[in-house]
Amino acid sequence: MTDGSDDVLYPNRDGGRGPKGVSRRRLLAGSAAGAAATAGCTGEDSGADSDGSSEGGTGADGATDRDGTSENAGDEGAATVFVFNTGDKTVSVVDAATDELVTTTYLGATSSFPSNQYLPDLLTSTGEAMWLNVDDGVRAIEASSLSELASFETGSGANWQEVTPEGDHLIVSAREPTHKQYRLDADPTSETFGDVTGEIDRKPEGGRGDNDGPGPCDVTVHPDGSYAYVPDIYGDSLTVIDVEAFEVVTQVSVPPVGNAAASPWMATVAWDGTRLLVENNEGEHGTESIWDVSDPAEPEEVARLTDDDGLGKLPLTSEIGPDSETGYVFTPDSRSVTVIDLVAAEVTDTIDLGGAAFVGTWGPGREKLYAPVQTSDELKVIDPDENAVTATIAVGSEPYGATAGTVRPEGDVAGSLLATMSALGVELSDAGTTYCIGNCACGHQL
């Protein structure tokens, strides 16, 4: 499944596609939001009641209050989920306490795989950064202002990044044609913030077929911060990197369970550092590996789950529950999340999402799991105690990546108006796209 004809790995190889057609619901909602935003800019009182008063709150598709602000806007301590909408380059801001949309504002960039493993614990004050994979590199965005703090071009169109638990490093996997690992200074208070502090050229390892490298795809960091795990989609291996020395210390071969190559591509390590989930793009529907990483430098695979075990189709990414004993695997071709008991190494449940979700994020405190459903422009809220969807939130166009924190951006009339224009199909910029796996509608091409 990993040659150049694979439309999962290369969704836009044949020219890609632009934003999807505008639905009547989005057109009407966008028009209403645009009118409200315009009134706020011009001083018109079109939203006022007959007595001259107006009712606050957020409108459909993220219209802010008439003055461009929202409750707790810019506040520290406000539990927040950020959803990146690939269809219109907006970000939807969700209140993680009430599970309600606060606003959708134009960002001018989007991200399929933002850093979200440890970020919800680190993003607690203004000045701190969200790390996104944008265009041909990675970008740091200040959470309260949504302004760019730093950027780095890797030379690859497919990038993944993760901050270390203390927030001092950003580890980057840059797939073809670069085939490199980078370490960046991720401390916004540092004089070298955003600078490359380490680099590993993986090309000498080679890759399967005509691939000129192993294709480092995704990265997850052990909770003690000492090691990073990288699945190599063209090398059929799991690579362990010493974070401080920034060198490869272990490389484990991943054999296939059938006739096709294993093609490991995504991974998530448990909070207690004992288990590692790896998604494999092998066979017709993909497989899921459970690894023992109790010895962090020497991972051992203990189980491989397939659709015969109840695994959903196209296991793409995963999140691990707060107890470190439950895995949640996003299986978009089944429009669901597959729940795995990591101790028993078996599928225990399936959560129907009603659409395709490719990634998810825990909210602050890891109390709820949030899944952007790209095919329905919604964010699903999953209760891990019930293994069920407990809320559905309308967000922007074709949501894909998500992360969280306890900092909330300030409301902005201009951002809301631009979001409305973009949702209506106005192309504001051809930059700021992101590589997506599967249903990629953001126009990015490798």
Image: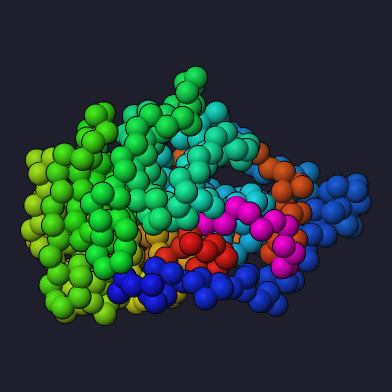
Q: In the rendered picture of this protein, how many numbered marks are placed on residues?
A: 0
Observer-nearest of 201 and 348? 201
In the image, 186: left or right of 146? left
**Measuring 31% from the left and 40% from the top, which residue is drawn there?**
200
Observer-nearest of 238 and 85? 238
Observer-nearest of 157 and 350? 157
The answer to whether residue 190 is above or below residue 109 is: above
In the image, 144: left or right of 374? right
Magenta stretch encompasses residue 7: no
Could you tell me if residue 332 is visible in this image? yes
**Measuring 45% from the left and 52% from the top, which residue is drawn there?**
156
**Measuring 31% from the left and 63% from the top, which residue is drawn there?**
211
The answer to whether residue 282 is above or below residue 362 is: below
Measured as percent of width and height from the top left, residue 262 is found at 20, 67
Q: Which image quarter is the N terminus in?
A: bottom left
Could you tell me if residue 339 is visible in this image? no
The answer to whether residue 211 is above or below residue 71 is: below
User: In the rendered structure, which segment of residues is drawn in magenta?
Assistant: 424-434
Q: Magenta region, mostly helix, strand or loop?
A: loop
The answer to whether residue 294 is above or below residue 57 is: above
Measured as percent of width and height from the top left, residue 356 is found at 43, 72
**Measuring 57% from the left and 65% from the top, which residue is drawn there?**
443
Measured as percent of width and height from the top left, residue 18 is found at 62, 70
Measured as percent of width and height from the top left, residue 72 is found at 61, 38
Observer-nearest of 51 and 120? 120
Which quadrant of the view contains residue 217?
bottom left
In the image, 68: left or right of 252? right
